[in-house]
Image: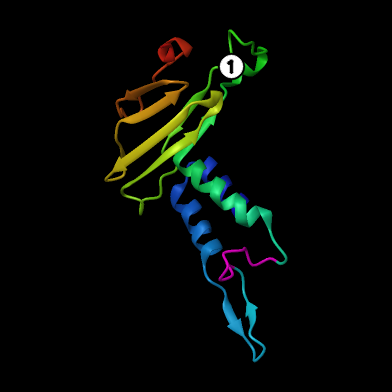
Amino acid sequence: MGWKTNLWARFLDGDHAMLILKNLLKPIGMKGEKGQFSGGGMYPNLFDAHPPFQIDGNFGATAGVVEMLLQSHIPVHAEQVAPTRSAPHPFILHLLPALPSEWQQGAIEGLIARGGAKVDITWQNGKLTPITLRYGAKQITLPAQAGKALELSAKDFSP
């Protein structure tokens, strides 16, 4: 189920990703006199209910939540050029690309984007508020402008 959460987040469908996540996190029921568990979901110890341990469910779901809040990609044209230390690949950040409608407010700090930038995101009423990017010792705050692309380079983070 973790991979499905990631997939729907990449499809930019936060509500469907949330539905899958809820199914994954649903506590499973007890069945029978021996106290056996039944059904899919999550054991009381938070392990995914696919014994003995399903890495996809336990870690994939966490990655799915991150994909709902931040997606970091290398532009297609950049993949054709080998990166160097002085000219690393550019990258694109999509902030709150698949925010579920029920997550009207929230915050997350320290997400790591391509290139090593740390990203702090907050939102109110389902809308992005100014974000903070940290790279090295430099921190910058950027305005929240829906649909507006901002181009940054290493110079923006120079001391």
- Which residue is farthest left? 125
Relative height, residue 18 to residue 48 (above, below): above
Query: For the view shown, which residue lies furthest in the top direction?
Result: 86
Q: Which image quarter holds the C terminus?
A: top left
> Relative to residue 14, is residue 48 depicted above or below?
below
- The answer to which of 79 and 130 lies nearer the viewer is 130
Left or right: 24, with 52 as reference point: left
- The residue at 50%/34% (across/down) is 71
Q: Looking at numbered disc 1 in the image, what kind of residue is underneath it?
A: His
Predominant SS of the magenta segment: loop
Does the image show residue 104? yes
In percent of width and height, residue 49 lies at: 64, 67
The answer to which image quadrant residue 30 occupies is bottom right
Residue that appears at 43% across and 11% down:
158
Decide whether residue 46 is among the magenta residues: yes
Residue that badge 1 annotates: 89
Q: Residue at 56% across / 62% down in the picture?
A: 24
Local secondary structure at mark 1? loop
Q: Residues within 10 Å of mark 1 (few under 14, many from 20)?
A: some
Measuring from the top left, give residue 9's x and y in whole percent.
51, 44
Q: Is residue 49 magenta?
A: yes
35, 105: nearer the viewer:
35
User: Which span is picked out in magenta?
Assistant: 41-50
The N terminus is located in which quarter?
Answer: bottom right
Instruction: Report the front residue among 59 and 1.
Output: 59
Residue at point 61%, 56% (across, down):
58
Residue extending farthest to the right is 52
Q: Is residue 143 left or right of residue 2?
A: left
Q: State how many labels appear.
A: 1
Instruction: Give the quarter of the image for residue 75.
Output: top right
Residue 53 x %, y %: 70, 61
Q: Give residue 73's position: percent from left, percent from top.
A: 55, 28
